[in-house]
Every structure is written in C-alpha cells, then in structure tokens.
Amino acid sequence: MTININRRSLLTGAGALTISVVLPGASARAAVFGAATRPELKPENLSTYITLNADGSCTAYWGKMDMGQGTDVGVSQMIAEELDLPIEKVTLMQGDTATSVNMGGASGSTGVQSGGKAMKSAAAEARYQLVELASKHLGVPADQLTVSNGVVSSKTDASKKVSYGDLIGGRYFDTQLTWNKQIGNALFVEGKGKPKAVSEYKVVGTSPPRRDVAEKVLGTADFISDIKVPGMVHARMVMPPVVGAEPVNVDEASVKDIPGVQIVRIKEFLAVAAPKEWDAIKASRQLKVTWSDVKPPFPEQKKLYEHIRNAKAIKRDDGKDVGNVDEAFKNAARIVEATYEWPFQSHAGMGPACAVVDYKPDGLSTVWTPTQKPHFGRDGVANALGLPQEKVRGIYAHGSGSYGRNDSGDAAAAAALVAKALGKPVRMQFMRAEGTGWDPKGPASVHTSRAAIDKDGNVTAWHFESKGFSRLDVNSNESEPAHTLAGQQAGVPLKFEAAFGAPEESYGFPAKRKAWEVVAPLVERSSPVRTSHLRDPVGPQIHFASESFIDELAFSLNMDPVEFRLKNLKDPRDLAVVKAAAEKAGWKPRTAARKEVRGDVLVGQGISFSQRSGSRCAIVAEVEINRSTGKVWGRKFTVGHECGIIINPQLLTQTIEGNIVQGTSRSLWEEAKFSQSTVTSVDWLSYPILDMTEAPEMIDVVLIDRKDLPPNGAGECSMRPIAAAIANAIYDATGVRQRQAPFTPERIKAGFV
Amino acid sequence: MATRIELNVDGKAHTIEADPDMPLLYALRDDLGLKNPRFGCGLAQCGACTVWINGEPVRSCITTVDSVGASKVTTLAGIGKDGKPHKLQEAYIAEQVPQCGYCLNGWLMTGAALLEHTPKPTDAQIRDAMAGIKCRCGTHVSILRAVKRASQA
Ligand code: FES
Ligand code: FES
C-alpha cells in the first residue's frame, strides 16, 4: 500500500498519519491511501475484485454470472459480511471482460461455492487492509479496532473513528493477493485477512431482494434484444432443410426487392442482413437457395434408443467398484433389473438467442451477449473476428434465461461472422425455429439398473449402467469455433469430448458398480442435436433411472420406498433431506402401489432423492392423473434441501421452485423430435412446456441450514430428483412403471389398458 | 411496399413508413424503439409480444401493422396510472417473481388486463387467463402469488 501524505498534513508539519481527528460529520481525509487509477486487471490484484467508493460503498467485480436465480445477491451478501457493510452498500458488477477477470461465468452451480468463496476471501483481505490503514490513520493498533457499518473505530475510544470512504474512497487498493494461478471456476485468491466466524454473521442468512427485478418488471431494463449500435444491421440465419446440406446456389435476385439486404455465405453458413429488422426476416424467408443433396443423417426417431443400444461405445468409464460386484451377482438368489430411456431435450429459451457485435477492425470491438460465460464468449467472438482477445470486449446483457450452454454462444459467433463479412455492427437474432430446433440439446440416453438379492432378501449388489450421447458434443465455454454452430457451419469440425456421469448417492449396498458409455454424435458437424450442458447436465436422466429403480427395488423387497431409503442411505445429510421431505409431505408408507381413485382422477405420491456435488435434495411428488385423458398434474411437491450454510433463504426457495416447474415440464412433456432429415420440434406446439394451467398448486420447501458447512451450489440440485419423484408417484397412482420420459398422456394412457 | 402508417401508442401519435403486412411488434420495437413487447416466437404461442389494443391483450407478433388503424395501443410502459406502476407490477416486485424476466411482458399485460375485468379472480380464473403464456425459467408459482397479491391490494 502506498501512503501519500496529503497537503494539509504537510502544511501543519505534523506527523502525517497520526494527527488526524475526524470531526463528527466532517469528511476529512488525513492521508491518501491507495492508487489514483485502477491497477491492471490481474487476478492477483485486490482492486480486481473490491473497490471502495467516496461514499463508503463498495463496488465489487465478479467474473461469474447470475442468470436470474439471485446468485449475485448471495455473493454480495458474502462480500458485505466480510466488509461489515450493509448489503445496500455493496454493488456487484458482473459479466464485463473490461472490469472483471475470468472466474468461469455461470457454470455448474459454482457461483456461490467457488465464485462466492473467492470474492469472500478478497473482501476479507480488503477489510484487513482497511483496518491496517485505519490503524495508521488513527494511531490505534489494528487489534484494538472494530468495524461496524463501514466505519473503523477504536474499541476503547469511540471518538477515534474513520470511515472506509474517508480512508480510501474513490481510490484503489494497490496490494496483492496470493492467486492460485487458475482462471475460470477454480480461480481463488487469498490475503492476510481471514474470513469471519459464522457466529458473527449478520448479512449471510438473511433475504435481501434481487437488484434486477424492479427494472425488469417496470420494463426499464435493457435486454440483449434492446441493444442498438449506430450503423447496425439486423441479421437472420437461413438453415438447411436437411442436416449437413450446403447452399449450392443462392439466388440473390430473389430478395432484390428488399431494401439494403446483404447475404453472407461461408460454406454451410448462410445469413441475411438488412437495416430494418422486418426486412431481414422477410429476406431470410424469401431467399431462394438450392441446397446440396445429402442423405438424411438421422435414424428414425422411434429407433433412437435402439440406435444407442447398438452403437459402438467410443468411451467407457467403469467407475470404481465397491465390493465384489460380479461375485454378488453370481451368488444372487434373484436379480431385479430394469431399463430406462430419456430423450434429447431443448433449452428452448423463452426468446431465441440474440447477440450484438460492434466490429472495429482497427480499434476495440465489442460483443453484447446473454451467455453465461462472457469471458469465454468474448474469446470465441475474437476468434471469429480474427482479432486478439484484448481487442474485443465482452459485455453480458440480460437475455432469456440460461440453463447451461444454450444458443447464445451460437448467436454471438454468427453475429461475428456476419459483422466481419460486412464490416458493420450486427445484431443477430435467431427465430423460434432455430431457438428450439437448432439449440444444443441435453443428451438422449438409456440406463440399465440391476440389483442382486440374496435368499434373505438383502440387496448384495447394485450395478448401474448408462449409455448415451455425450453431454459435451460442444464445450460449454464457446471459446473456439469448433464449439459453436456458426463455427462448424463455416467449416470447423466438431471437437467433442466424451463425457457422461453416474448417480450421486450414499446407498450402502455391499457391492456397487456405476459405469457409463458414450456413443458417437449422430452427425459430425453442424448438428441440431449436438449436445451440451442443459440444467444439471445428465443429472435428470441418470437419477430418473436410478431413483425409479430404487423404488422398484423397495417394492420387490416388500418395503416402503421411504423406509428402504432410510435403511440403505448412509450419509446422515442424505438421511436428513429424505426424512425432512417425507415428514413434511405426510408420507404414507406402502409396500405396493396404492392406486387411489378420487372421482375422475388417480392420485399418487412418490419420493426420490439425490446428491449433487455436495448438495442434496429429496422430493415428494403428489400427482393427479386424469383417467380419461391420461394427463398428469404434478399437484404438490415437498422438497427437503440441504446445501451447507444458506446465504439467502428466499432466493434459494425461489430457485428450487423454478427447478421444480422446469423439471416437471421436462418430465411430463419435453422431447426433441426429429425426422431423418432434421429436428422437427421447432416451436411451442411441437416442443410443449408446462403450461400455467398445469403449474403445481403448491411447492413446499424445507430448507436445512447447515451453518457448520461451507455454502454449496444450489442452482441445479433440485432439478435432478424430480423425474423419478413424478414417475414413482405415477406408479403409486396407476401401478404402472414409467420407464421412458417424458410421461405424456399417450404413454400414461397406454399403461391403463 | 412501404406506406405511411399512423399509430397511437401509449397516448402518443406516431407515423412510420412500413410494409402494411409487417407485424405490429416490429413497428413498436424497431421503428419506435420501444422495448417491452418482446420477440419470443412470432407465432402467437408464447405471449412475449403482448400489447393492449383498446384495452384488450393482443399478440403483436401476428397483428399486422395496418390492421391497427386508430386503435389505442398500450405497452407495458403505459399500464401504470398517475405516474405509478400498475398494482400488478408492484405485486411482482414484492413477490420477486422473475428469474430472467424475458417472459414478464406477456404475463403482466395479460394479468393486468385480467384484473381490469375481474378484480378478484379465483385461482382457476387466473390460470385460465394465463393459459398459453410461456415462462421457461418456471416462475409459475411466483406469478400465481403475485396475481393473488395484486387482487387483494
Ligand atoms: S412473440 Fe408473439 S406470442 Fe410469442
Ligand atoms: S423468468 Fe425467464 S422465462 Fe420467465
């Protein structure tokens, strides 16, 4: 820390740092600390994360993102806590490559658990530095100082005090932190300041409101689609009728009546642009294109699961066996076995993706994008523009929700290609058919679960196998052309990673094997079923299978599903969420489907549970099934949830509610449909989601607050167990197992007869 | 071909040059620079583009601009009274309804119209009035709470 003696102390000739007495109400600054300009944006600089303003408020800079669940409020609470500031005095800036370092963006529910942890550590260091400055300023040893509300004062003489604003407000910390040399999710920094004890918390655990709600509700917030740049043109994509076809002939005359229209074509990539938005849309519809003749690349939809079963595995992960699985199956008195299937699903954002690229070949270009990862997204756009990363600034703009790697990165890359080709700022917006038909998909998969039972009715082994498409045909970081649709259309081959996953649980069966296999993508490049992360990547499909099977197992052993879980789960935290959900829901023990009839409806209750990277969640679903239509209503959900210490109970509850609704939608309705030529689910009729008329009547959330544990990710955990909870409830109501998602009226009705 | 079209939006008169068959949505967003009606589907399937025409919620993505005539168009910016937000907007803020908020325009414009006609709607009336509007983030139970709250305000 540089310390500059200010003019007044020079004039008085007194000792620079100890003479100042801050008169009540006066804003006297006896010494000037810190740097006048913000030091370089480097991970090791404290100023990269925390700055104090002249009014004593804090502006923090975060390299992660909130996507509407309020993670930014949670992280602000953690910062306010360490700085002893009221929450209103902490502003968190996010998603701008010019002001924050890459901390991974929104990614795998790590916002609080790693991003928040790093910010908390930086804030603790800022507080430490501020107390040190105050000590010099007041002439009081640091250990005799206390901080309240952003004012540092002597513990013994309350008249000796100085505010953060007077110490360093408007200037910048110029000290360093120890940086772990990682960027992205793993970035962590640490200084001399140690975070507070939980017992001293005042802000963490309360529920301050979101910062973006009022402006969104009042309609004053700018979303990505509202951003305009002078000279900007509107762009739209023209997509092939058969996946893999290239435009052989593009008839420019077919759109010549449209003012200012321009066409951009790079191999398979075909876009139109015009100064007026409607003209760009018209041109995209009117343009006559002759496409190359390619063989329709997809299997028949009804043979999808057969395709997965028969396809050669390109990667297998055997996991780590517990006990001797093969031996247990050899000695089994009987074996219980079942197979489950899960379809491709779309992100299907409320609005198709949009991005604005202001291309300045000789200056600083800018991309506005609603991606979860503005830093990586910026890298991708720089790549598409052929510019070094430092010549492009990435700025997050509100978009239509993001639940993983949706189509935002594709729109940004497409905008960049058009901007570069035309040398103009471009606003690219996809139409609905691209948003639903061509967005990255959650992978389709099949799962086989087997259990060995001995002659006394004990489970001696459990063997769970998944086989499906990878969850990462395209990487969620969007930083390379290979990972965007536009990049692939322009000729860069898919660079996919074979990845899946396994159930997360603590069942104490003596032997366990959890393995997975991944099959090759259906199409090498530019595929509308290329997979990537969709909220809780592969979690819903895996736990639909594993937790449906646990129910099947319980009934086959003549046990109640809750009792079975309580008997076999070993981790006390798992037991706690199962108990919490079952008790609050008024669980009715049963050893077979109850098939309760209430007038026109069949009524059922089912439970499911899972862990997710350290958090855990149990859900009791109560469903009503219309006997004539087969339509399922998820009427009530009771959720037991534990994610360590809770930062903001209200926003956590609403996050869980959102997951329950979206998860119910995916369980009951969602399946990407395709012909052998292309994806045919392209709008809200062909890709229906849960309607308001089908929304739950009640979501009852029981939060378990573990103040003794660090905060853990909560954005996705409650997405995992929903499908199985619903499937198990449907079984309770009908006596029929749903082993294929989604549980559409047709499938349910088929079970009645 | 583009023709002169007059529009009355949120109490203000505007003249634009546009294709008569261009959807009203693009007149509002692109020509007038208003942002609250949003593009969600362009197919009348989601509600994001909803405006009121003479007080009735209408999907501006399928309403041609020349069909509007002298009708009064109201956007989200115009549903408040006396410089105050609509009570449904206040309820949405109190209930912290949105996640991303991209869908809000449709729910608010439809919900506010419902409350104008039916100040004390039942749960079933609320659900029916909102049928077909989409929210991908799944904020449905918060929306129901907010409409209830506004109806009691
Ligand atoms: S954009 Fe008009 S209803 Fe979807
Ligand atoms: S809040 Fe995101 S679509 Fe409704």
Image (cartoon, rainbow, N blue to C red):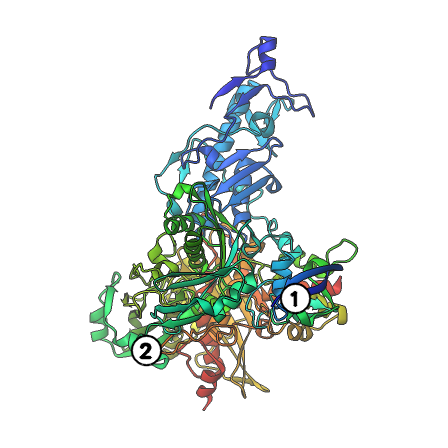
Badge 2 and badge 1 both on one subunit: no
Name the residue carrying label 1. B3
Q: Residue at x 30, y 79 (%)?
A: A306
In the depicted structure, whether residue A601 falls above or below residue A12:
below
Question: Residue B18 or A505: which is nearer the viewer?
Answer: B18
The image quadrant of residue B9 is bottom right
Q: Position of residue A733 (x, y in %)?
A: 50, 81
Please, which residue is most extreme toward the right here? B82
Q: Position of residue A397 (x, y in %)?
A: 53, 51
Q: Residue at x 44, y 28 (%)?
A: A175
Which element type, helix, strand or loop, lies under badge 1? strand
Which element type, helix, strand or loop, lies under badge 2? loop
Q: Residue at x 55, y 27 (%)?
A: A168
In the depicted structure, whether residue A327 falls above or below residue A59:
below
Q: CA distance from mark 2 to mark 1?
A: 49 Å
| Ligand 2 picture quarter | bottom right
The image quadrant of residue A438 is bottom left
Which of the image's four quarters has the C terminus of chain B?
bottom right
Question: Residue A251 or A25: which is nearer the viewer?
Answer: A251
Q: Position of residue B39 (x, y in %)?
A: 57, 64
Name the residue carrying label 2. A299
